[in-house]
Amino acid sequence: MIIFLQSDVQEQDARYQELLAHLNQLPGVRHQSHVVQGDEKTLTEIYLLGDTHKVDETTIEAFDAVERVIRVSEEYRILGRHADAKRISGFTYNGVRFSQDNCHIFAGLCAVDTPEHVELMMKALQSHGQVCTRMGAYKPRTNPYSFQGHGKECLPWVFELAGKYGIKVIAMEVTHEKQIDEINEALTATGHPTGVMLQIGTRNTQNFELLKAVGRQRVFPVLFKRGYGVSLNESLNAAEYLASEGTSNVIFCLRGMKSIAGAPHRNMVDFGQVPVVKRLTRMPVCVDPSHSVGTRERSSDGILDVAHVAAQGLVAGANMVLVDFHPEPASALVDGPQALLMDELPRFLDDMQASHEFYRKRLAIWQQT
Ligand code: PEP
Ligand code: MN
């Protein structure tokens, strides 16, 4: 069950306290409050979890603090949309708004290597008006002898460079909960020059203990990658673990599925499911064309496969693109073959903007009455 409070009700309010007193004495029911920031207003939602079937909706609705109550029996209780068009989607982090209505490009290095490469990347992003990037410090690798990422050692200089070039959000994968503290410490030590979006990689989609730990922190939003070998439903349930522990600022990322049917691409592109995720949940949806395609091949029309599939995702309404670039792919320590070249950045960004605008045109066509 979800209780939506009146928009003017704050935590200190007597009406709020009166409702909480009632909820606290319900047997077998726990509750969790979440403040949802919309474009125009901020709303508080209270999720009732546990033995809620005996809870009477009308009694709850009678409290002055309450605007309305919905009962959700379906999965993805917190992140789900539950056929309720009034539920706000999205959040603002470090001044950047993420929602199911807008679009951001996170171009950057798959793995942080040298300060020179990180600086070249960030400088190029700033010169093209970008405030987001991707930078992997902790790399989950298939082979234990492969480069595992520079880890916490690189964080201070990566964050300082981000601050120097006006980067506000860095998508950075975490593979262990202790890395959240390392990121927090490095941000504090450098004076918070930037922000971090914690990334859950496809190999950790169902690492429930990691998800619970990431869900318990309240500082960073999360970029959650779909599992490459499990159903969409299983991945959405896994994302709900984050929300059930308290983090509902989550972006869901499609990144291709492991299948021989995807060849010659690295994975089978699954971006046709962008609208499905938007219908089932309130999460903004990201597409990762680099890990889907896995090469820098281009089609006979001269357009990179990576750009083609990213455009397909955006034309279907995706809200974010996570894409690998590298100033010198031949020397990249991870995923060099799929990294786009720096001189391709402006064309890629123009293509993504045009694709998002094309989605907006499609929306206007379909919204005509
Ligand atoms: C990545 O984005 O660097 C990555 C490892 O992706 P995935 O988890 O989708 O393989
Ligand atoms: Mn990679």
Image (cartoon, rainbow, N blue to C red):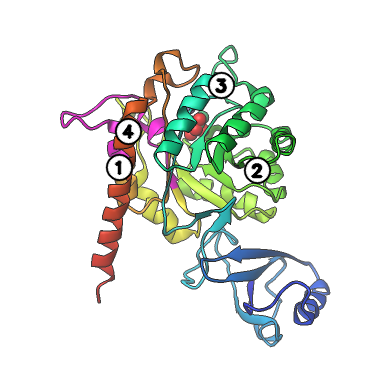
Measured along the vertical axis of the image, is residue 347 above or below residue 47?
above
Residue 8's label in the rendered image is none
Can the viewer see residue 205?
no
Residue 115's label in the rendered image is 3
Q: From mark 3 to mark 2, how far is it between C-alphas?
A: 30 Å
Residue type of the residue flagged with mark 2: Leu
Can the viewer see residue 147?
yes
Residue type of the residue flagged with mark 1: Asp
Q: From mark 1 to mark 4, how far is it between C-alphas?
A: 14 Å
Measured along the vertical axis of the image, is residue 39 above or below residue 335?
below
* Quarter of the N terminus within the rendering: bottom right
What residue is disc 2 on? 211
- How would you rate the neighbour count of disc 3 (Cα within 10 Å): few for under 14, some for 14-19, many for 20 or more? few
Q: Is residue 281 left or right of residue 22?
A: left
Residue 306's label in the rendered image is 4
Q: From mark 3 to mark 1, how far is it between C-alphas?
A: 27 Å
What residue is disc 1 on? 350
Whether label 4 touches label 3, CB < 8 Å: no
Q: From mark 2 to mark 1, how far is it between C-alphas?
A: 35 Å
| Residue at image location 28% in from the left, 32% down from the top | 305
Callout 2 secondary element: helix
Q: From mark 4 to mark 2, how far is it between C-alphas?
A: 29 Å
